[in-house]
Amino acid sequence: MPTLVIANKLYSSWSLRPWLMLSELGVEFDEIMVRLDDAGTSEALRRYSPAAKAPVLIDGDQTVWDSLAIMEYLSERYGLGRVWPAEPVPRALARCLSAEMHSGFPALRSGCPMNLGKHYAFRDRGPGVARDAARIVEAWRDARARFGRDGPFLFGAFTAADAMFAPVVTRLDTYGFPVEPDTRAYMDAVLGLASFGRWKEAALAETWSVREDEVDEVPLVDHRAGR
Ligand SMILES: N[C@@H](CCC(=O)N[C@@H](CS)C(=O)NCC(=O)O)C(=O)O
């Protein structure tokens, strides 16, 4: 059985991606959690990966680190035709979008860190955040219009592109971004996945907070209040 090394479920956007993909593929796996923001985080992660980052997939004697490389590995090893869209044209678009997500949107990522424990009122978080959010919504709309007719996800059925964007879906939700009904429907499809529900439940049961992943604002809702 493969093992996925992840970081805190409340905050680790990179870990969520392959965890969702493995879950949606129905692959059974073990998980090891390494806590972020701990004096020993880097050292603990280096035991599993030379890059000292989560996620890391360990499958027999194979170690695969970096979320996108893990998607490719899962496609070849466990889900040919299910991790990426089966047809070449949508598959190329899914890879473009996943790569764009993997290397882009720095303003949204730093201004709106993934935090499954809180909800905030929407506010203007600067032009970079607005630009990133607008591009993401445009990318989702384009994929859905061209290839999404057979299901609620970007390419109909759930693929790696949805897994890559899942943390951004949570960010738009957490920070109360106003979105059109088509975007909300896509977000609800991701947030409504049973696998995401299991991840979130475990996230909310975590008792640790990471200062640098918390914005300095009073939330509308603190789902872990009292913990
Ligand atoms: N590009 C990497 C990014 C991985 C990453 O930055 N992971 C964070 C957790 S969300 C991490 O391991 N942080 C620990 C550290 O930097 O010490 C990927 O796609 O997997």
Image (tube, grey):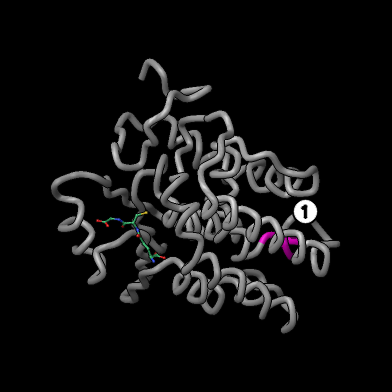
In the image, taking residue 146 as reference, residue 4 lies left or right, namely left
Q: Please tell me which residue lies in front, 26 or 179.
A: 179
Disc 1 residue type (three-letter): Pro
Label 1 SS: loop
Q: Which residues are magenta?
A: 154-158
Q: Please tell me which residue lies in front, 5 or 15.
A: 15
Above-or-below relation of 61 to 196: below
Q: Is residue 26 visible?
A: no
The x and y percentages for residue 195 are: 58, 46
The x and y percentages for residue 159 are: 65, 64
| 155 part of magenta stretch | yes
The x and y percentages for residue 141 are: 76, 59
**Quarter of the N terminus within the rendering:** bottom left
Ligand 1 falls in which quarter? bottom left
Q: Please tell me which residue lies in front, 197 or 108.
A: 108
The residue at the point 71 percent across, 60 percent down is 138
The furthest residue to the bottom:
88
The residue at the point 35 percent across, 67 percent down is 58
